[in-house]
Image (cartoon, coloured by chain):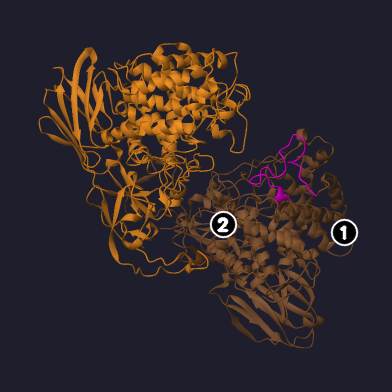
Chain colours: A brown, B orange
């Protein structure tokens, strides 16, 4: 991998090497469209919502209780509650962004002031362990989450350093990281955390500070895992990826968020240390995971029991776990792999996951969330009460807060840093990976400034126009991702001179001497299309789904006539789906008269020739999956049985 | 319901009322065939295996440790470990049977001697609570299982009373029951146990002793549940059926074993108190559960996470939980409903569950068990080590013992008492519900002795001959169940005079003056047949299964050529399945060339016309589901995709 020092500092991921150079929050600005709306709600509703809830449920108060010596009595929340305060701080820092003082600075300062006194002189910081009446420090590495919490603290500290300059939060994070190196370095505790996360954080801190020891410690943690230092237990050591060394595994397995955070950290270590074998191992695992263990939405995780990947092709829509945090983590991993390799397939999965998992979790008002993102809801749920937190993962509709509330703050930090996931540069030019109304301003090799403006109503429309506002007067290359979902459809690229050509999934490039005012247009065919599953995905045999551009669609009962539920829907995929109004899609189908559930004594019967269908044909309205459950209790399904 | 006092005392369930009168272990003897083999292995291998394991893992030792004041330090196993010692005792008592001293008496005496001193003067008995250094008695009704353990103790005590006469074990059980009445009766603790079980046990103790207070206490427990006395938690109060009163519920829900034990207890209470509304409520719940929440095997429970029923029609074969104990509990419930109502549908489900869940759990040698009975195994598992217990439920092949080892002892007690589940009597005659080689000896109204001998090789063959060996010289009625699985097939009854007639599922009766030597024959068509699922069982759309008589079949990789795994199997149900040698079945099909799992980057693709199948046609060998996983690691599936 080549050296590739980023120009921007306002970056969540700033590798020293890689095929592509990331562009930071000072280089890419989202100005309108789908993600601008989501980011505005995040900034104006979600961040404050998370802060208010964490005050209310006492997770911020835990730090005060620790300082005031009453933590044993007063601690609230699970053992990892500290981490959500840190994720919120990270989100606020990215939202504040680089440059001039921002409204969020006051919030950050107030939270930092609450946390700081709880840090002990040697850098240890955790409200659940180590004080009188609590379990000793590091007495439960498997479940204690102490290193996991540091990971999120460090990511928050890095976000502050990268946006506002090193501040108090960064200093707290560095002291914690130094403590971790002293305690878990060579000669120290020979252990790893039950929940990976610190690995990627330490590498980023090394990148931000230039301190080699943080990278060394991250490398040690990655290498140490998989050797059985964590205890065996009901779900097996695969749950926390301690069954096999990272470089020996063939597929992601166990708890999905743990697996994905670890893989992200392993990529970071591989990139910084030039360890191509380690990078190749993660790429291999990613390939197998995407080919066999990923839902159509990009969601990962099949098991509710242990929040884990299932066996290959175990992807039941009605029991999909597809945790929001696994979606966030999958985007983190994909972004790192994209920077390292330049391969558009990683941006393809990131796009799918952003539109269908990350965008699905929050409600329209940004004040309620899905923890688990099912692909099939069989009975109308009840709206969780607005004033109490929900049992983990189990809200039937989006809930305001959870007993384990990792997802809201994870969505918040992802939306806050989203502009940094859209575009990159290299010596030859600029690469656009995700499409939104954006302004991009960076410099190419030799310091030549480039400014672009991207205009699109993607994903509603498929036309993406890039206007060159500033350019050197020598040739360079503009690269646009042609999404994999456009396979077989007629995508085309219109050059500045009006000539056009067909382009296939992968990347389309224009190399030329650009002039200010030049326009390049990519026309992507977002017409809705039928998809079918691999026959090995048993749970959806005999069904089809609809995707429109990157957006997965679903049937929702509120759009069906006469109080029908979605399980009555049968669709006829011999006719193409059609666009309806307001981003809906209409497909030909029928509403089967299935009768009451109790019309048979037993749901299995001797095989008989299929009866002639009696149901009347009708148009079935589908809506974007990310928009479901915003209109009250409903039933929903993504995979639709075919008419006989 | 009519009064119906049983003649035998050797009965697991002896209702004072009901449509049918159970026949006891002194009235029905299994002499050969499928169940005789299973019962022999149970008696000669499983009972000793369970005793040895409970010595080894310290669960029997817990009682000694309690007496010797070292329980806080030395206690082993989960909070409910005592209950498995009691279930083993119950199994031994049924195995010892009525009449003369039996080899198991010594074992029972030795275990009773270990337990007795641990009972406290007021009758309290539990090794997990109440002693110095332990949590106080009844401080955790939700999870402590104290009343659940009494339930199994009482069932063991009743088994002793019913087979050997009241002994020390019975006395311990009565003291415990008296303590429960004193502690949880009116004016006492207003609570219920997180795990139902004591309800059915107390009713049986009332029946065995004639003591009304045990019935009153059981009634109180049934009525008290569903009013939210247990705490809300992650899975909701439905997990322990505390969400709704028993008489208000529409379907079984929550933890499957809990739900089924509670339903059994509610039937017992309804029968003893003449509460027809309560009985009707349970029948209604059973109907809805069988129609929508039951696997083809009779297995119940879809969720691994909370061992619970899922939503209607959530019956994924590859994530079927179908706990062995839920199968045992379902048979217990069905038997109680059959006695109360006389309706053969309850015997139908019991038969299905016995052959396909209860018979599936133990290995051929009776020394390893399935806890969960999946209907689809996707990768070859590893053989669990013979010398360590397995994490709960998670053995990939049968395991010798589990950290939570409720299933082995539950199978053991069920096989031991199985003869008592086969036949009943009423004023008009004898009813045969389950077919096996048996000798039946009882008396009809007026004390007239009847002796029958049933000869059959069921379920391999479908011919059941009943020879009358002793009979009064006035007319009476012999009733034979015609299983629901024979729907649409040509079943017939051959009378003693050689005349025959077609019979349909339900019951077939012969009323006549029998003579010794008369033979009645029921010919059931056990030829293998294709079954298809209700379209609402999404997880098995597009597949078929094979059943032969009551036995569900499966494809197992060890029977496929060239190292194929079962996921390559496609079957053509346009041709009937054929009998193969040794109880196998052969179906036409093909082995799809699916390629390597990684041949596609992504398991979803634009819909395209189905490619012409290229695989060669071949015969696919199927084996009885209960026999799978006895030939080393394999993959297996019950529901088989159809050829295109």
Task: State the residue position of label 1.
Answer: A102
> At 88% across and 52% down in the image, what residue appears?
A106
> At 73% across and 37% down in the image, what residue appears?
A134
> Looking at the image, do the residues carrying marks 2 and 1 touch, with CB atoms under 8 Å apart?
no
Q: Which part of the image, by quadrant, shows the C terminus of chain A?
A: bottom left
Describe residue B44's horizontal placement relative to residue A460 as left or right. Answer: left
Q: Position of residue B7 (x, y in %)?
A: 29, 15
- Same chain, marks 2 and 1? yes
Residue B15 visible at all? no
Q: Which residues are magenta?
A: A123-149
Which of the labelled discs sits on residue A554, or is there none? 2
Residue B24 visible at all? yes
> How many C-alpha atoms fall within 10 Å of the one at disc 2: few (<14), some, or many (≥20)?
many
Describe residue B289's horizontal placement relative to residue B350 as left or right. Answer: right
Q: Position of residue B375 (x, y in %)?
A: 40, 48
Q: Furthest-right residue in view?
A: A101
Chain designation of label 2: A
Q: Position of residue A243 (x, y in %)?
A: 55, 53
Magenta region, mostly helix, strand or loop?
Answer: loop
Q: Is residue B48 magenta?
A: no
Q: Position of residue B499 (x, y in %)?
A: 11, 34
């Amino acid at each position: 991998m080549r050296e590739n020092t980023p120009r921007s500092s306002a970056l969540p991921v700033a590798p020293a090497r890689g095929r592509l150079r990331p562009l930071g929050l000072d280089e890419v600005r989202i100005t309108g469209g789908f993600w601008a709306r989501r980011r505005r709600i995040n900034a104006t509703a979600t961040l404050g919502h998370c802060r208010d809830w964490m005050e209310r449920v006492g997770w911020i108060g835990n730090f005060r209780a620790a300082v005031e010596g009453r933590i044993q009595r007063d601690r609230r929340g699970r053992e990892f509650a500290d981490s959500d305060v840190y994720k919120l701080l990270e989100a606020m820092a990215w939202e504040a962004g680089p440059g001039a003082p921002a409204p969020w600075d006051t919030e950050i300062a107030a939270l930092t002031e609450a946390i700081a006194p709880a840090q002990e002189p040697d850098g240890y910081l955790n409200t659940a362990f180590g004080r009188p009446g609590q379990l000793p420090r590091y007495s439960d590495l498997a479940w204690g989450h102490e290193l996991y919490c540091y990971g999120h603290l460090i990511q928050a500290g890095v976000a502050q350093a990268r946006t506002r300059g090193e501040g108090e939060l960064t200093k707290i994070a560095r002291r914690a990281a130094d403590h971790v190196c002293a305690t878990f370095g060579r000669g120290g505790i020979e252990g790893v955390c039950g929940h990976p996360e610190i690995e990627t954080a330490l590498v980023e801190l090394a990148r931000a500070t230039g301190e080699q020891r943080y990278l060394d410690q991250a490398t040690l943690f990655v290498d140490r895992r998989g050797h059985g230092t964590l205890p065996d237990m009901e779900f097996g050591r695969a749950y926390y990826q301690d069954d096999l060394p990272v470089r020996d595994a063939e597929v992601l397995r166990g708890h999905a968020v743990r697996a994905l955070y670890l893989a992200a950290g392993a990529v970071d270590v591989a990139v910084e240390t030039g360890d191509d074998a380690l990078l190749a191992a993660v790429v291999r695992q990613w390939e197998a995971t995407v080919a066999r263990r990923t839902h159509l939405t990009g969601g990962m995780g099949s098991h509710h029991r242990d929040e884990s990947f299932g066996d290959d092709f175990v992807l039941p829509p009605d029991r999909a776990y597809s945790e929001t945090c696994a979606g966030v983590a999958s985007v983190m991993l994909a972004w790192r792999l994209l920077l390292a390799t330049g391969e558009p397939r990683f941006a393809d999965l990131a796009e799918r996951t952003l539109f269908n998992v990350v965008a699905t979790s929050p409600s329209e008002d940004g004040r309620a969330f899905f923890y688990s993102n099912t692909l099939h809801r069989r009975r109308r749920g009840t709206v969780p009460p607005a004033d109490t937190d929900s049992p983990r993962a189990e809200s039937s509709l989006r809930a305001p807060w959870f007993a384990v509330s990792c997802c809201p703050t994870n969505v918040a930090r992802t939306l806050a840093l989203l502009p940094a996931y859209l575009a990159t540069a290299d010596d030859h030019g600029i690469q656009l990976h995700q499409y939104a109304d954006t302004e991009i301003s960076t410099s190419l090799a030799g310091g030549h400034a480039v400014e672009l403006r991207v205009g699109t109503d993607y994903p509603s429309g498929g036309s993406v126009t890039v206007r060159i506002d500033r350019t050197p007067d020598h040739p360079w290359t503009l690269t646009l991702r042609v999404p994999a979902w456009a396979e077989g459809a007629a995508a085309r690229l219109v050059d500045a001179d009006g000539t056009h050509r067909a382009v296939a999934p992968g990347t389309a490039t224009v190399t030329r001497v650009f002039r200010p005012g030049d326009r390049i247009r990519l026309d992507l065919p977002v017409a809705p299309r039928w998809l079918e599953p691999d026959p090995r995905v048993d749970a959806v045999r005999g069904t089809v789904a609809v995707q429109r551009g990157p957006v997965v669609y679903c049937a929702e009962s509120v759009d069906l006539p006469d109080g029908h539920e979605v399980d009555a829907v049968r669709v006829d995929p011999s006719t193409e789906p059609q666009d309806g109004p307001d981003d809906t899609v209409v497909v030909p189908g029928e509403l089967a008269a299935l009768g009451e559930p109790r019309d048979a004594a037993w749901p299995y019967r001797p095989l008989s020739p299929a009866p002639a269908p009696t149901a009347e044909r009708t148009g079935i309205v589908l809506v974007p999956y990310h928009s479901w459950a915003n209109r009250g209790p409903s039933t929903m399904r993504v995979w639709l049985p075919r008419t006989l």
